[in-house]
Image: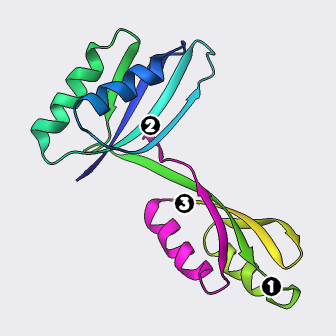
């Protein structure tokens, strides 16, 4: 099962490497990772999605993270009310006559066209994992040429 963890960490050189090293040394896979500094430039916020077979494995991961000196807090969103989102940017085949259809599709998924040129539209969209999955299915009818997506971001209510 996938679990979403948030970490508040000191914004220092090597912190991300130590956290990633903790996961790899124990054979845990990071399914998604997003990190950025907060309003306080000395602090960073990380959202990590990890595959854990059971609660015991998840508890072990959290204990190991809490042992790291640069980690300030660890929050497990698995049983907490929270909102999570991912963002995609994609190049989609789109002729001038298909542009209105693409725009209608994107309206349903909180997306927009950023740029259109040479029958290629660059789009961006934000949503939860299920919304992004459905959007990608809808975009496949146009033809997706290239896709990049962020890791999951999460925040508690």
- 47 in the magenta segment: no
Q: Quadrant of residue 22?
A: top left
Element carrying mark 1: helix
Q: Are marks 3 and 2 in contact (CB under 8 Å)?
A: no
Q: Earlier in the sequence, mark 2 or mark 1?
A: 2
- Residue numbers of the magenta segment: 128-157
Query: Which residue position holds label 1?
Result: 100
Query: Which residue position holds label 3?
Result: 127
Q: Position of residue 116 (x, y in %)?
A: 86, 71
147 shown above or below 120: above
Q: Position of residue 153 (x, y in %)?
A: 49, 44
Element carrying mark 2: strand
At 85% across and 91% down in the image, what residue appears? 97
Query: Which residue position holds label 2?
Result: 47
Calculate the distance from the C-alpha at mark 2 to the C-alpha at mark 1. Answer: 36 Å
Left or right of 47? Residue 149 is right
Left or right of 64? Residue 43 is right
Labels in figure, total: 3
Q: Position of residue 74 (x, y in %)?
A: 33, 25
């Amino acid at each position: 099962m996938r679990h979403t963890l948030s970490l508040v960490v000191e914004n220092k050189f090597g912190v991300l490497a130590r956290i990633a090293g903790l996961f790899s040394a124990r054979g845990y896979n990071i399914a998604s990772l997003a990190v950025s500094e907060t309003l306080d430039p000395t602090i960073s916020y990380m959202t990590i999605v990890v595959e854990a077979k059971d609660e015991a494995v998840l508890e072990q991961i959290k204990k190991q993270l809490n042992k790291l000196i640069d980690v300030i807090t660890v929050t497990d969103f698995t049983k907490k009310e929270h909102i999570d989102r991912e963002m995609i940017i994609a190049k989609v085949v789109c002729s001038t006559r298909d542009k209105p259809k693409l725009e209608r599709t994107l309206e349903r998924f909180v997306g927009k066209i950023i740029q259109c040129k040479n029958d290629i539209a660059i789009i961006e969209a934000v949503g939860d994992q299920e919304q992004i999955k459905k959007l990608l299915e809808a975009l496949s009818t146009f033809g997706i040429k290239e896709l990049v997506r962020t890791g999951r971001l999460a925040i508690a209510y």
